[in-house]
Amino acid sequence: MKPRLLIYLAAIAIVLLASAGFVASTQADTHLLDVPPGAQPGFYIAGSQNLNPAQFHNAGDLQFFWWRVLNPDPGVFNWSSIDNYLAQHAINGKKVGISIVTAEGRSGNGGLPSPGFVRGNSNVWYNGVTTDQIYGGGFENGLADWVTSGPVTTVNNPVFAGSLAAKMGGNTGSTALLRQYTFRIPAYLSNATISYWWRMETAEAPGSASDTWRVELLENGNVISTIQTNTSAGVRDTWQQHTLDLTPYENRWVELRFTLNNNGSAPTSLFVDNVALNVTPRMLKFWAPEYKQPYQTFVQALAARYKNDSRVEFIGIGTGIWGETRATDEVDDPASQAAGLNSDLWISTVNAITDMYISAFSQGGSLTKSVLLQMAPFQFVPRERKEFSTYAAEHGVGLSLNGLFADTNVALACDRPGYDYNCAGSYDQIVQFNNQVPIGFETYGYMLPTKTEFLWGLLNGMDKKADYIRMSSFDNLVLPGGQPNTDYTNLMNWANQWIGKDLTDTPSVWVAMRDHRNPFRYGTTGDVEYTSEYPQVGNFQFWLYQRDDAPNARTVPETNQATEGGQPVGLGLCPAGAAGPPGYPCFANAYNSALPANAPEAWVIRRTDQSTNNPLMAFSIDDGYVYGLNNQVEIKVTYWNHGTDRWTLSYLDSAGVQQKAIPVGSADPWVQKTNSGAFVTTSFVLTDTQFSNGMAGGVDFVLDSRSDTGANDGNEWVHFVEVKKLG
């Protein structure tokens, strides 16, 4: 059994023995083809940028296409947008990924990506939840959500409702502005109504129109609607409500502005309360026959045109909003339930759409392209993701998780109790099926905003045996003048040697030393989680396994970052008692101030622990990569050159005798550190080996932090270990 998968399953039945995990076997599964013949795995850059792969190391480009653009009327198909993209981007050896979008969320275009002839059928839509797009419209928190200028304040008398209202003006010769911007009027609406209560008090003579006020809607600073105008000659001293239908202004980001001009000789005040913009968007019934039938016709036409086009690398299934496996934004869950949607119906709907693509893109019983289910979200409970991902993978469809961070919670959840939650983490089905179907990740610049996070995000994806890494909105990838940002492109070039590889063709196997970080910050989203919940603990590994359960080989994770979100950074399953693999440790104070502060390798790292009689780091190579006698390999160890002590690397020769490896360029069987403070890679070439799990603890080779004479002369901090077959 593949050890990576065995770790994942073992967590159900056993208490993990150590921080890096317990491995009972190092034999991988028999490999199945996970991408079609002729596939071109690698990085795919989304959008209109047409970057040179010789500089940016991308295998291709990716674009999202609206259904309605491609299929504007029944039986009418317009492929020009895809054809033009292929003509422009399938050059210089690049291939193209195509993702279909049939709907977006509230922050996007709602149901507009679907054709009008589909949306026009009343059986295809239902009303979403009515929401108020105005923040602080009752002024109960003062003016915190508003921008003001001139005489504007809050008062407790008069008020229409609650305890406070806004007061504008009250001073002659003044202009008062009360503004809220920018907020969204969603697309594809049933209705949108702005309403507010107003009251005018003035000392102007009856009938005098000297003072004026108005309410306006603006877009990009330009007035697009004058909602109301009035003067000091209007109704006084009485609360009035004003409403206006704003449905014509759907699908816009707008500003609301109240303006009061005191131009006369006596003051006028305008009181405003209970400002609301109530919107009710329409939601698509993806499960309705009136939706599915025309969609299936479209998918068949799409496949007829492109399934044998060698320029097309993969197809992203358009399932729900944003092409992914969610029917609505979370706020609209109650409306979807009222319309008849439940978990089982959603699972069957996703599976039915998956079947459309399988049928359309198959030829001779096999898919002609990598077809990817964009399976990150679920509608109500995680079980849905587990079931529709399993269904897709068992039918040859790949899994694409659109959201790659350097770390995450609720990643591997086979220890999580409950029918709707067990084995339904973000990575569970990816880990289960990554040797059978294509695996994709989509990531954005805000998810991996720094070189450090980009490195660890790539390691995370490769740990899952990614075939495709889709990059969207990476503004830092291209420098002014169009040159590549080598902080990113060098890492892409480095990672390309493993993306899309398996045990039959990988150039090497490796392990990156790490553990789960807590608190964890999700890029630049502003979200910080302060407790662990079923994260991926232990290392990122690519068929090489570091073994904490071997004798005297329990390691300690550390980090060069002191705090996150104002709290100390811990590593492992933190805080103690957090939800995750039973018995997994928390290293609560993992910060080591001596580690290089800006080194990506030290964002998380492991060291030996001589003080607890754990001077070793032990490693097992997957038996499917190297096994038996007389193997010739190169072993590379990337470590922190801290201190002037020595360390050694031990292995068994073909006679079963333990030997100490001699570093390349040296005559001595040890590594002498020089305290440079840098990260250094040392290489060992071994020509007479026995990799049969024969060393203590069933491992293949051991790094010993002690000197060549066995003295405890200092620990070793290791970032990355790689094993490569020679000949």
Image: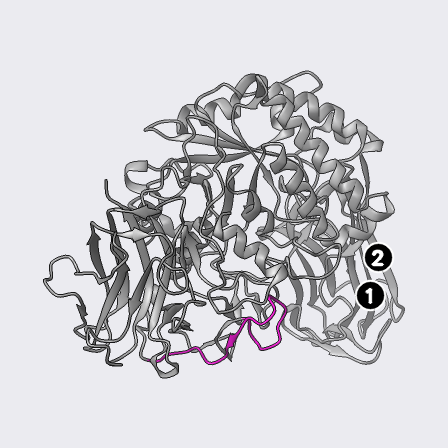
Q: Position of residue 176 (x, y in %)?
A: 66, 69
Assign a secondary structure to mark 1. Answer: strand
Specify whether 548 is left or right of 361: left
Task: Give whichever of 167, 363 is nearer the camera.
Answer: 363
Tell me the quarter of the picture where residue 359 sits: top right
| Rendered position, 645 above or below 12 | below
Q: Position of residue 129 (x, y in %)?
A: 80, 51
Residue at the far front in the pictured view = 655
Question: Mark 2: which amino acid?
Answer: His
Assign a secondary structure to mark 2. Answer: strand
Tell me the quarter of the picture where residue 214 sits: bottom right
Q: Main secondary structure of the magenta part?
A: loop
Quadrant (top left, top right, bottom left, bottom right) of the C terminus: top left
Residue at the far right in the pictured view = 238
Binning the other alpha carbons within 10 Å of mark 2 as few (below 14), some (14 to 19) or many (20 upward) gives: few
Q: Position of residue 490 (x, y in %)?
A: 29, 49
Task: Give whichever of 165, 341 is nearer the camera.
Answer: 341
Question: Mark 1: which amino acid?
Answer: Trp
Could one spot residue 656 in this view of the protein?
yes
| Rendered position, 541 above or below 596 | above
Q: Which residue is mark 1?
A: 198
Binning the other alpha carbons within 10 Å of mark 1 as few (below 14), some (14 to 19) or many (20 upward) gives: many
| Rendered position, 252 above or below 53 | below
Specify whether 241 is left or right of 509: right
- Magenta stretch in the rendered image: 573-593
Q: Residue at x 47, y 37 (%)?
A: 31
Q: Residue at x 37, y 76 (%)?
A: 614
Q: Position of residue 609 (x, y in %)?
A: 36, 77
Going from the N terminus, do you reach mark 2 or mark 1 first?
A: 1
Q: Residue at x 88, y 67 (%)?
A: 239
In contact (CB < 8 Å): disc 2 and disc 1 = yes
Q: Which residue is mark 2?
A: 242
